[in-house]
Amino acid sequence: MDGRVFRADDPVWDTWYPPNGFRCRCGVKTLSERQVRERGLKVETGAPQAAEVDGKFVNILPDPNFANNPAKVPFKPDLKDYPEPLKKAFERREASKKKTSK
């Protein structure tokens, strides 16, 4: 994905937003349309499907459990190992958020 350019609203980001694996050091830079033009970059559509590695075509996907955009997935903590007072405080706060958002 290095050097590839996609629009901010492209569905590719639903699968390929970093991190894309353990110890991933990937990043995303935002460019204006003018910057894309000035740098002579090509805006692509659609995620890569396969690449040639050692003369064989292989599917390209992020590592397991990394094919998502963390900014689009709501945080839902696993409260089972938390002390009961913390669980209840969290649940009360979440309930009050829902009431005020209506």
Image (cartoon, grey):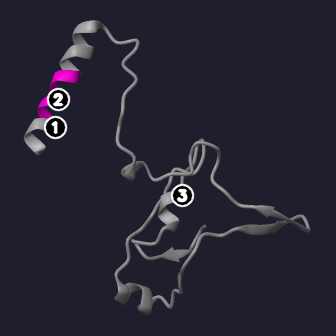
Q: Which mark is residue 15?
A: 3
Q: Give the answer, above or below, for where 49 lies relative to 90.
A: below
Q: Quick check: 35 left or right of 22?
A: left
Q: Residue at x 54, y 59 (%)?
A: 16
**Residue 58 locus on image (x, y percent):** 81, 62
Local packing at callout 2 (Cα closer than 10 Å; few below 14, some 14-19, many 20+) is few
- Residue at numbered disc 1: 98
Q: Residue at x 75, y 67 (%)?
A: 50
- Residue at numbered disc 2: 95
Residue 37, picture quadrant? bottom left
Q: Which mark is residue 30?
A: none
Q: Give the answer, above or below, for where 45 lies relative to 65.
A: below
Local packing at callout 3 (Cα closer than 10 Å; few below 14, some 14-19, many 20+) is some
N-term mark: 2 or 3: 3
Residues at marks 1 and 2 touching, judged by CB atoms closer than 8 Å: yes
Q: Residue at x 20, y 30 (%)?
A: 94
| Quadrant of the image containing the C terminus | top left
